[in-house]
Image: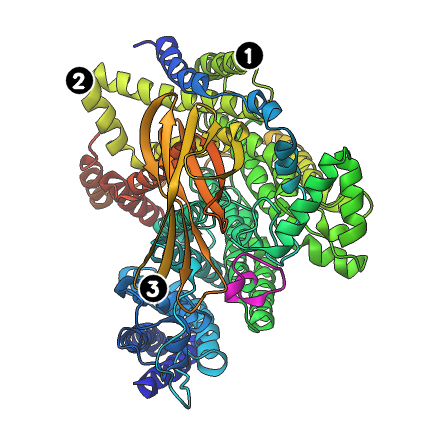
């Protein structure tokens, strides 16, 4: 089979699986308020101490989670925007209610620190790599002659290679 | 029996300390007898900790509730296997389990790798030094053999969250991974101490590294699977600090696995490899520190204790000693190899390492950032899943891209012909995938990019398999035989490719999360809820006792369109002794395409039930990817006769030149 044909086969198989998937937005519209609440539940931390978002709190029975979800639902039904809901929850619970810290001040270190580190690393690699490629190649030392016995041993070992 | 356990642990601490001192003195003074004695101490240590472990297991199985640990983690109605798993369910037991594994690995190294005579005293010293820390904790701070003045009639039982088959797979594999990295670290320390800084220590520990990485990968995958079926929120990774703690050494360990190849092939990256293994070992301990310290709130909060400062001090000591040794040895670590081109496999491995370590740094920074914020600003903040997803998804995609590029770039310098031959068709395939997904209305750019990259990387790998098989076929072998022999004769290379295919499936499964749909519904008997092509009809509730719990199960008939395809029974269980903590047992209908995941979220007094129904696409492919990753690692791990012969030939050559 030619590489192009194999590529085609892989791709047809992969696309077949993907074709069966349905984009999420096709269903989100019909779910209304609940969909918005579900979405917002991924953005706020549960206040029960589990350290997870409202959407992923692991407690089957969780008063703080249920109260917060009810509060979010009430605000959504009252026509509040996500920004207004966020402001309301931050005013009530503090900044720690946000599952992702706001992009300002010291928090920028968390948001951009990894990319800054990656960029610095990439620049270092490029600079060092360029310098290394310009270095003159070291002269290879002439191989030391092997004694007949060493040669015999080496040949014996190499013969065992199943090439 | 507890006296025997306590005595064994105390002697183990003494033997560890003795082994550390004897190994260092033996190496420093050139005393072969002390070195020999230190090596024997590793066997004694293993024996003592085996006795201690056997005592604990006996007490667990005999329900000796006079032992405080047994009373805390078992009960009379706990099944046999969960009782055995109580060994690592609590802090003291898991410390003993860790110490026992470490002692076993230490004894195995001394037994199997005694040929590395110059390195061995320092390897033994490092293992014994680490063991000293753990055995001292066991002897002085957290004993699994502490007695209660008045034994209770029954124990408190195992936390219901831990009563899942995952308990038998996730912690042991995770620990095997964490503890396993001690051995390559010990060899690295030994290489620095003895100035034997060529690739000897790397060759000596290749299989240890691979095995540790394998177990850590398995531990993470088992943890994901456990979280998925047990925690009842429909996901498998919540970016919990303890989850992150396991991911960090995995990322640096993966970088190490790749970068050692550069040192083996080109004699480069010597300092970098040492840094990576020090970081990997440090991060392995950091994982335990996070689990045990409680400095960050975690889903693993059942494991909190006051051991945090001690672990922190140990990590600090390890890092200070290791990096000081590295700094002192820098003059001996000059690389002899040079880079021929920035478009070469060596250079692409540098970027692969950069991205892996960058990902580890990103996870580390996010994990500890709440502490940083509180220390600097005095403001408590949270860093949860949305942050980690946003920051790490681009890094993950870059990693996927590099995974496709690295293996097929030529060593030294890739020519234009090499690039076109290996990447033209796969690249076009990736772009076409992206284009068609967009045309079809898939709006999530991240999912589009991920699937396109998955197509690209899969094509590069399969093309390489195909080309290799075709070369063998041209020598007269039938294609399937050629393919099989290609893998078996080049296990390290093709095992690695199989691992990559597994990782691609994992990425595809993660990208499938973009198509997740969710519904919540309160149903009365006979009512239905529809999600995608499924309709679920609520048939009613049943309640029945089991030996350990009172089970309330809902029955839902599942229709795919109009056709009934099965029955699901999500449960809500109240475990004896943990009545305040009812547990959800989710019901999952898995197909290759998607999982239908149902949670019984609540029960009304009128018999109505609140269900959360989720359709998780491509989940099965994540677990298949995990299996493929394991298979590939086993292929790469399996001893290759030719490799051993190559090493012997190389040894002879070096010996002849010396």
Query: Is B477 located above or below residue A59 in the figure?
Result: above
Q: Position of residue B2 (x, y in %)?
A: 33, 85
Give the camera-side residue of B249 and B14. Answer: B249
Magenta span covers which residues?
Answer: B290-303
Q: Which residue sits at x=22%, y=27%?
A: B484
- Of badges 3 and 2, nearer the viewer stands 3
The residues tagged by marks 3 and 2 sit, at their Cα atoms, a distance apart of: 57 Å
Q: How many marks are shown on the rendered structure?
A: 3
Q: Is residue B130 magenta?
A: no
Within the image, what quadrant is residue B16 found in?
Answer: bottom left
Give the number of the disc on residue B478: 2
The residue furthest bottom is: B149
Q: Is residue B301 magenta?
A: yes
Q: Position of residue B618 (x, y in %)?
A: 43, 30
Q: Is residue B403 left or right of residue B485?
A: right
Position of the N terminus of chain A by quadrant: top left
Give the number of the disc on residue A138: none
Q: Position of residue B6 (x, y in %)?
A: 37, 84
Give the camera-side residue of B394 and B297. Answer: B297
The kind of secondary structure element at disc 3 is loop
- Which of the marked residues, 3 or 1, is nearer the chain's N terminus? 1
Position of the C terminus of chain A by quadrant: top left
Query: Is B310 located above or below residue B224 in the figure?
Result: below
Within the image, what quadrant is residue B23 found in?
Answer: bottom left
How many residues crowd around disc 2 within 10 Å: few (fewer than 14), some, or many (20 or more)? few
Residue position for label 1: B435
Residue position for label 3: B548
């Amino acid at each position: 089979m030619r590489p192009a044909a194999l590529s085609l086969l892989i791709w047809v198989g992969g696309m077949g699986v993907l074709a069966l998937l349905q984009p999420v937005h096709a269903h989100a519209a019909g779910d209304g308020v609940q969909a918005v609440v579900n979405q917002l539940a991924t953005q706020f931390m549960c206040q029960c101490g589990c350290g997870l978002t409202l959407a992923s709190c692991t407690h089957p029975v969780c008063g703080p989670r249920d109260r917060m979800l009810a509060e979010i639902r009430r605000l959504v039904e009252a026509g509040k925007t996500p920004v207004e809901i966020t402001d309301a929850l931050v005013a009530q619970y503090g900044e720690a209610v946000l599952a992702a810290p706001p992009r300002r001040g010291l928090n920028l270190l968390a948001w951009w620190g990894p990319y800054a580190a990656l960029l610095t690393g990439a620049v270092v690699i490029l600079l060092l790599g360029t310098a290394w490629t310009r270095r003159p190649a070291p002269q290879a030392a002439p191989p030391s002659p092997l004694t007949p016995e060493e040669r015999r041993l080496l040949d014996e070992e190499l013969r065992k290679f199943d090439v | 029996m507890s006296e025997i356990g306590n005595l064994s642990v105390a002697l183990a601490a003494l033997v560890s300390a003795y082994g550390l001192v004897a190994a260092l003195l033996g190496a420093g003074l050139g005393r072969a007898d002390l070195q020999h004695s230190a090596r024997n101490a590793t066997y004694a240590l293993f024996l003592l900790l085996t006795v201690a472990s056997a005592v604990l297991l006996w007490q667990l199985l005999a329900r000796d509730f006079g032992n405080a640990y047994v009373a805390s983690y078992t009960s009379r109605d706990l099944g046999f296997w969960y009782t055995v798993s109580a060994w690592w369910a609590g802090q003291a037991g898991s410390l003993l389990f860790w110490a026992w594994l470490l002692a076993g690995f230490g004894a195995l190294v001394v037994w199997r790798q005694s040929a590395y005579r110059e390195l061995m005293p320092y390897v033994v010293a490092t293992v014994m030094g680490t063991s000293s820390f753990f055995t001292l904790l066991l002897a002085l701070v957290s004993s699994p053999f502490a007695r209660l003045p008045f034994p209770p009639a029954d124990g408190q039982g195992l936390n219901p969250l831990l009563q899942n088959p995952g308990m038998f797979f996730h912690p042991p594999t995770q620990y095997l991974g964490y503890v396993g990295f001690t051995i390559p670290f010990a060899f690295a320390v030994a290489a620095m101490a003895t100035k034997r800084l060529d690739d000897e220590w790397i060759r000596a520990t290749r299989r240890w590294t691979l095995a540790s990485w394998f177990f850590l990968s398995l531990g993470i995958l088992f943890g994901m699977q456990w979280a998925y079926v047990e925690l009842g929120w429909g996901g498998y990774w919540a970016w919990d600090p303890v989850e992150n703690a396991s991911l960090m050494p995995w990322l640096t360990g993966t970088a190490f696995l790749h970068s050692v190849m550069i040192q083996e092939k080109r004699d480069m990256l010597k300092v970098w490899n040492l840094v990576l293994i020090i970081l990997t070992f440090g991060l392995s301990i950091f994982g335990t520190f996070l689990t045990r310290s409680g400095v960050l709130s975690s889903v693993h909060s059942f494991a909190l204790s006051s051991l945090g400062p001690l672990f922190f001090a140990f990590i600090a000591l390890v890092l200070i000693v290791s990096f000081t040794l590295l700094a002192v040895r820098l003059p001996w670590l000059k690389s002899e190899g040079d880079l021929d081109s920035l478009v070469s496999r060596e250079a692409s491995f540098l970027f692969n390492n950069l991205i892996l370590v960058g990902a580890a740094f990103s996870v580390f920074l996010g994990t500890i950032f709440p502490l940083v914020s509180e220390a600097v600003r005095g403001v408590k903040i949270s860093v949860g899943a949305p942050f980690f997803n946003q920051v790490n998804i681009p890094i993950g995609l870059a990693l996927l891209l590099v995974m496709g590029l690295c293996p097929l770039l030529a060593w030294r310098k890739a020519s234009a012909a090499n690039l076109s031959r290996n990447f033209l068709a796969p690249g076009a395939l990736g772009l076409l995938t992206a284009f068609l997904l967009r045309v079809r209305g898939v709006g999530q750019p991240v999912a589009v990019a991920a699937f396109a990259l998955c197509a690209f990387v899969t094509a590069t790998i399969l093309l390489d398999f195909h080309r290799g098989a075709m070369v063998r076929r041209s020598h007269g072998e039938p294609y399937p035989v050629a393919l099989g022999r290609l893998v078996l004769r080049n296990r390290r290379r093709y095992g690695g490719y199989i691992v990559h295919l597994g990782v691609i499936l994992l990425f595809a499964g993660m990208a499938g999360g973009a198509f997740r749909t969710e519904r919540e519904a309160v149903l009365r008997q006979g009512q239905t809820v529809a999600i995608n092509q499924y309709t679920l009809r609520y048939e009613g509730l049943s309640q029945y006792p089991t030996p350990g719990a009172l089970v309330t199960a809902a029955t839902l008939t599942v229709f795919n369109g109009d056709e009934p395809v099965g029955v699901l029974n999500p449960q809500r269980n109240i475990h004896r002794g943990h009545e305040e903590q009812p547990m959800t047992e989710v019901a999952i209908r898995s197909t290759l395409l998607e999982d239908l995941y149902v949670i019984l979220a609540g029960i009304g007094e009128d018999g109505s039930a609140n269900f959360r129904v989720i359709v998780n696409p491509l989940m099965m492919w994540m677990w298949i990817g995990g299996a493929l990753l394991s298979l590939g690692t086993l292929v790469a791990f399996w001893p290759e006769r030719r490799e051993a012969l190559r090493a012997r030939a190389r040894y002879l050559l070096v010996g002849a030149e010396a």
